[in-house]
Image: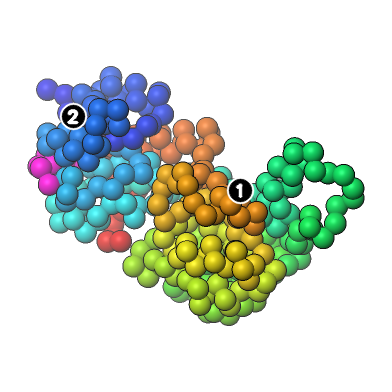
């Protein structure tokens, strides 16, 4: 009898076809009703699950007696109850490294777009507003040679530092739970406290995992430490920032702008952020290129099949969130 695999979000078609040739595949379909109820029911006799962007924990996995592996098509895993999965001896795998450069590119896309007001000036021009040489209203802020502060010097943070140091001759600061001397020295990056980084940086980029230590890391106090010409970029998880405090800071223009790819609640279809000309908002597209999502799906497929076929998967999440 074929093993059962539950696909709990949209995945690459070619990978889906491969899975359907090997296993009994059931896809969770939002059109069929409550997603959590579907997961609760379909996971009962599932051997494996693959997907991303869904909260999986005891509430919807409590009947999953046969479940051996959850293969996440993501590097982040804050949406899974890792402690519960460890307790149930269910492997959780993810897709690190294959999306690093693509996500770092997006971080710089947001940094530059926010610095030079690209979305609002594009809209302004397309409304036929351009009638004379650009003036103070259209001025952005310089990037080249400025100070880049990175919160979280993991592989994505390091890739962002590389872009700033080599591409824009930036002075790099970083804040991390511990110093990363070997990585930092590649970019002459200075390890500093969060407050020091926030007060000195012209550009602050958040690239941390979401966990108990990083949740609400950036609130009103931290935003007040930033300079009025500073830009904040977030490509990590929305809950790292107190979104209401950020909206207040943008409204009062206590910071120049924000470039955001993630939000406290997702998907986000209405927000005060959408009314702000100094908020650049993207729909969680950090890894969203065809090539990278294909690589993520292939790695997630390998992790899943390895686990189902009795082999140790390459990218197991070991630590509790
Ligand atoms: C995922 C991401 O595609 O990898 C991650 O952690 O945030 C994205 O690249 C997203 O989580 C899918 O929902």
Q: Does residue 208 belong to the magenta stretch?
A: no
Q: Majority secondary structure of the magenta segment?
A: loop
Residue 195 to residue 232: above or below: below
Q: Which tag, 2 or 1, sits closer to the chain's start? A: 2
Residue range (magenta): 62-68
Residue 311 to residue 279: above or below: above
Q: Position of residue 203 (x, y in %)?
A: 64, 65
Tell me the element at label 1: helix
Left or right? Give the position of 181 relative to 255: left
Q: Does residue 67 belong to the magenta stretch?
A: yes
Q: Which residue is mark 2?
A: 4
Q: Residue at x 45, y 57 (%)?
A: 238
Q: Quadrant of the C terminus?
A: bottom left
How far is disc 2 from disc 1 in space, using C-alphas?
37 Å
Residue 148 location, quadrant = bottom right
Left or right? Give the position of 305 relative to 124: left
- Mark 1 closeness class: few <14, some 14–19, many ≥20 residues within 10 Å: some
Q: Residue at x 71, y 53 (%)?
A: 117
- Mark 2 closeness class: few <14, some 14–19, many ≥20 residues within 10 Å: many
Left or right? Give the position of 285 relative to 49: right
Q: Quadrant of the N terminus?
A: top left
Q: Residue at x 52, y 50 (%)?
A: 261
Residue 105 got which mark? Answer: 1
Residue 160 in view, yes or no = no
């Amino acid at each position: 009898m074929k093993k059962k695999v539950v696909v709990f979000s949209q995945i690459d078609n070619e990978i889906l076809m491969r899975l359907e040739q090997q296993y009994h595949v059931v896809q969770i379909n939002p059109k069929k009703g409550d997603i959590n109820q579907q997961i609760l029911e379909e996971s009962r006799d599932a051997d494996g699950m693959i997907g991303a962007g869904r909260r999986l924990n005891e509430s919807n996995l409590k009947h999953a007696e046969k479940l051996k592996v959850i293969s996440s098509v993501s590097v982040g895993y804050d949406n899974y109850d890792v402690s519960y999965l460890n307790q149930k001896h269910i492997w959780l795998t993810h897709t690190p490294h294959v999306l690093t450069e693509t996500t770092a590119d997006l971080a710089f896309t947001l940094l530059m777009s926010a610095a030079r007001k690209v979305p609002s000036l594009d809209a302004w021009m397309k409304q036929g507003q351009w009638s004379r040489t650009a003036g103070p209203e259209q001025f952005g802020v310089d990037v080249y040679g400025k100070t880049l502060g990175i919160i979280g010097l993991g592989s994505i943070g390091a890739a962002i530092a590389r872009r700033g140091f080599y591409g824009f001759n930036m002075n790099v600061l970083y804040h991390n739970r511990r110093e990363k001397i070997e990585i930092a020295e590649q970019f002459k990056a200075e390890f500093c406290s969060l407050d020091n980084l926030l007060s000195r940086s012209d550009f602050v980029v958040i690239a941390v995992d979401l966990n108990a230590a990083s949740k609400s890391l950036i609130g009103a106090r931290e935003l007040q430490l930033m300079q009025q010409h500073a830009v904040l970029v977030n490509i990590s998880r929305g809950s790292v920032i107190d979104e209401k405090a950020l909206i207040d800071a943008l409204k009062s223009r206590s910071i120049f702008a924000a470039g955001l790819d993630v939000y406290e609640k997702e998907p986000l279809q209405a927000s005060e952020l959408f009314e702000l000309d100094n908020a650049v908002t993207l729909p969680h597209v950090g890894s969203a290129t065809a090539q990278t999502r294909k690589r993520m799906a292939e790695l997630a497929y390998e992790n899943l099949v390895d686990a189902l076929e009795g082999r140790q998967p390459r990218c197991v999440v070991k630590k509790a969130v």
